[in-house]
Image: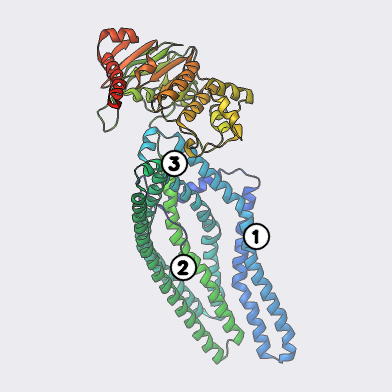
Amino acid sequence: MARGEGKVVSKAEPPVDPSPPITRTIGRLMSLIGGLRGPGYRLRLVVAFLLTLFGKVLAVFSPLVLAEGINRLSEGDATGALPTFIGLAGFWAALRFASTAGPQIRDAIFQPISEEAQRRAGANVFSHVHNLSVRFHQSKRTGSVYRTIERGVRAIDFLLRFLAFNIAPTVIELLLAAGVLGFRYGWWFALIAGATVFIYAWITFGVTEWRLKHRREMNEADSEAAGRAVDSLLNFETVKSFAAESRETERYDRALSSYADAAIRSNTSLVLLNVLQNLLMNIGLVGMVIAAGYLVASGPMGPGDITAVILIMTNLYAPLNILGFAYREIKQTSIDMEKMFTLLDEAPDVSDKPNAAVLKPARGEVVFDAVGFAHEGRDTGLDAVSFTAPAGKTTAIVGPSGAGKSTVLKLLFRFYDPTAGAVRIDGQDLRDVTQASLRSALGLVPQDVVLFNDTLRYNIAYGKPEAAQTELDDAARHAQLLTFIESLPQGWDTRVGERGLKLSGGEKQRVGIARVVLKDPAILILDEATSSLDSGTESEVQDALEDASRGRTTLVVAHRLSTIANADQILVLDAGRIVERGTHAALIAQDGLYATLWRHQAEEPEAAAAAAE
């Protein structure tokens, strides 16, 4: 009888063969296991396998001991044969105990290997996903990616155990059982057992192939529901601001309904498989008992042999059940693991050259040399953009929405590579240096500082985990945050909530500034760092930003032009081109796009005041 189902197999995404070659998946799993270097792992694996074989052998031969005891009891004087029977029955019980205890001990011995394999696989995939390019993360649902990793790692333990302790040992047990039945009782018994196994396997494999379609539908619905749930919960502020709780609940309920329908179809097909397996096993058992009864009646077999035949055949239920269950689950977990391995095979759009150098920022000069870039499926990008951001100076980048301002910053971080031209820091092409060393030289304060659901200490020290308390205090002081932190009951150990939601907008921005100040990068990047703040808070944060940028190469992307009026150089982007450049005074005098944007923003407060009157 097949076992119930308690796990969900993932739908392949990115697209893969829905029924991937099991040998390929097993090969990659064995490669993973072969790389384990824990204490005594090889010895543990051998001992665990031997314990499994030991249990299988005892399960086949122990019924013969009980059969001998029953035959002795039925053939001789009951009083004289009773001690022999009791002794053999006790021996049989001991063998049965050993046959079941062995696998339990095996599991304890094997557990460290399984846990290490899962840990290594999970860490490798997690690291790889973090190293994938921005384009990948923008196109994937976080919940779906996490579920892919979770299922794949969970499948490792299952597949390892069934490969090592069920497939080969079960085949050995079936052959031993057939051999014992054939040699001891006659080949008719072996034929009945063999026919039962063959038909059982044929039905199981056939129905399982049919059932996989329903399982894939169930997995697809499950991934959709998980993705919707994570997406909705991450954006709970938007949901609440639009009073859309009921709408989100309905969307999630529809996804759950689709999953429930697919699960019902899958489990109904499982019931059909269970019924067929039960029917076949009982037909085989009845055939075996009838044959044994005939031989007992005609003389060659004793009453104890009927018991042995029944026990051997009953013992076959478990390995047969495992055989069918293993085939079904290996097919399904191979899809889980194939999806995880596909994720692991995902190539990043941006990668380090084989012999990439470590970036050595000397002065912090940034040069864009005829840089071109086009977003996939979009017209916007950069067209022959050239400029130099002098070391130790502030360069501001302004322009209408979609002009390419954020693209400049993404190319500087090397989230993308330019399609033309080059980006250099102190004369070093960013494509020739490691991404880690490049990003270590850059410090970013974004428009919306996203924090980890941890303490203020953890978030501020994120760029320099080894920082001493005096360094943390100094960074917080520069960000005008130290007084606030010291006023909190738990001080530096105050938790900020998911994405920093326990802090105000200004407090989050100051945490972001403190984090960058502590990192002490060669180049500071401010991406609309104050655009989401009110005017009072903006003024306070602006003071902290000016303090952080003093004497440091700084690139500022700004919407509010008043915040960059003192920049050493202002670049005006429009439709991916630099259309103006100069100081604030020079650009106002030029009376071009910058002057138009300046006048428009200057008129907004006046219009608001007039409307208030």
**Residue 205 appears at what percent x and percent y?**
40, 65
Q: Is residue 82 left or right of residue 330?
A: right
Q: At x 45% / y 54%, what residue is drawn?
A: 333
Q: Quadrant of the C terminus?
A: top left
Q: Is residue 563 above or below residue 447?
A: above
Spatial CA distance of label 1 from label 2 is 25 Å
What kind of element bears circle 3? helix
Instruction: Determine which of the numbered discs, if any, sits on residue 437 in the image.
Output: none
Determine which residue is flagged by label 3.
Answer: 344
Q: Amino acid at mark 2?
A: Ala
| Dot placed on the residue nearer the N-terminal end, 2 or 3 | 2
**Residue 331 appears at what percent x and percent y?**
42, 57
Spatial CA distance of label 3 from label 1 is 34 Å
Determine which residue is flagged by label 1.
Answer: 105
Residue 50 can be seen in this image: yes
Q: Is residue 55 above or below residue 554?
A: below
